[in-house]
């Protein structure tokens, strides 16, 4: 079974028994990491569905041809009178913080068409604790002056993973947000003392960390970052093998949390695959972890 991403309520059953096995060649010697490691990143294609306010990232094959959807982000494209331009573009400049034309600031800005960029929800100042929280609640509908707004974590993912020259296609399809669907984010209220922080921001100072859940492997085999499954395993086996704990280390039970797995992997083919796992608990706050899926 070929997989990439999906949102599921986890139904905990009897623990999935993982065969004791080893994945040869799994771990890279840290000394092999070089200054050009970033250039060995996969080639991606970023599709922006302007009408649906949803971004889907595809991983291209080695020849730059066929692409597999691996990530989906909710976004805010340009509002009426400031529509995000349609067309095909390429990423160019990257900024950790960027001053916007309206005087606000964006984190993890990536330019792809003149003044049009991917970036976080705006901030009043260059301060991660001073976000325009009402704008965060507009994710999923047009709200920007033409840029593509994302959560902090999603903007950072593009900033970290999509190298300069990544192809970006902006199109309209109001009926179909994309093959992975359109994710949702927690809504902030005026009474929430943490509202000026992006809940997805992994900044160590973020007060949302106090309620952020933790992902873990229920079988305990392979180590904290390595999920090991036999050839022919199902999607259900993946979700049964990954659990979620709340901030007090309490284990979530059946139907109490949502989990999604993103990446380009094939459960019917032996190999090692890089995946990203996201969990959402009772407070609606997400946590994410990069793992290695070993199919043996």
Image (spheres, rainbow, N blue to C red):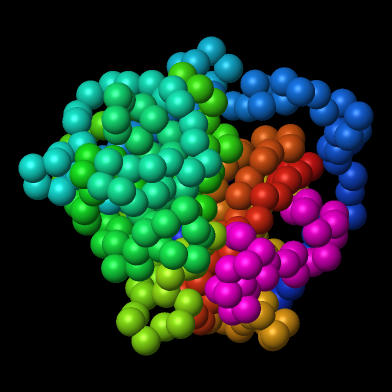
Coordinates of residue 238 in the picture (x, y in percent): 64, 58
Coordinates of residue 169 in the picture (x, y in percent): 30, 28
Above or below, 274 relative to 201: above
> Residue 116: which quarter of the image?
top left
Residue 39 or residue 228, whichever sits in front: 39
Q: Residue furthest left?
A: 81
Q: Is residue 82 magenta?
A: no
Residue 246 or residue 265, whichever sits in front: 246
- Specify the principal SS of the magenta part: loop
Res. 215 in view: yes
Coordinates of residue 5 in the picture (x, y in percent): 49, 49
> Residue 82: which quarter of the image?
top left
Residue 181 or residue 241, whichever sits in front: 181
Coordinates of residue 158 in the picture (x, y in percent): 49, 38
Q: Is residue 216 magenta?
A: yes
Quarter of the image with the N terminus in it: top right
Q: Is residue 217 left or right of residue 76?
A: right
Q: Residue furthest top?
A: 63
Q: Is residue 106 left or right of residue 77?
A: right
The residue drawn where x is 51% and y is 60% is 128
The residue drawn where x is 56% and y is 53% is 261
> Residue 138: which quarter of the image?
bottom left
The residue drawn where x is 61% and y is 60% is 203
Res. 58 in view: no
Magenta residues? 202-227
């Amino acid at each position: 079974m070929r997989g990439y991403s999906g949102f599921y309520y986890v139904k905990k059953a009897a623990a999935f028994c993982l065969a004791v096995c080893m994945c040869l060649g799994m771990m890279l010697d840290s000394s092999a990491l070089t200054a050009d490691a970033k250039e060995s990143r996969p080639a991606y294609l970023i599709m922006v569905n302007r009408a649906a306010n949803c971004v889907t990232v595809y991983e291209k094959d080695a020849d730059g041809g066929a692409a597999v959807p691996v990530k989906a982000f909710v976004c805010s494209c340009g509002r009426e009178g400031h529509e995000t331009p349609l067309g095909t573009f390429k990423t160019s400049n990257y900024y950790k913080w960027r001053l916007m034309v309206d005087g606000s600031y964006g984190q993890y800005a990536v330019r792809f068409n003149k003044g049009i960029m991917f970036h976080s929800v705006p901030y009043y100042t260059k301060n991660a604790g001073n976000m325009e929280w009402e704008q965060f609640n507009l994710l999923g509908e047009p709200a920007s002056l033409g840029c593509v707004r994302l959560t902090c974590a999603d903007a950072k993912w593009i900033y970290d993973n999509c190298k300069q020259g990544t192809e970006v296609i902006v199109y309209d399809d109001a009926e179909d947000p994309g093959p992975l669907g359109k994710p949702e984010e927690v809504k902030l209220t005026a009474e929430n003392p943490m509202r000026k922080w992006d809940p997805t921001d992994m900044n160590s100072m973020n007060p949302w960390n106090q309620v952020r859940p933790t992902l873990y492997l229920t079988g305990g085999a392979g180590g904290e970052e390595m999920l090991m499954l036999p050839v022919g395993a199902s999607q259900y086996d993946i979700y049964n093998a990954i659990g979620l704990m709340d901030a007090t280390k309490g284990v979530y039970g059946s139907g109490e949390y949502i989990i999604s797995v993103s990446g380009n992997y094939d459960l019917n083919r032996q190999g090692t695959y890089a995946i990203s796992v996201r969990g959402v608990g009772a407070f609606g706050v997400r946590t994410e972890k990069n793992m290695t899926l070993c199919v043996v």
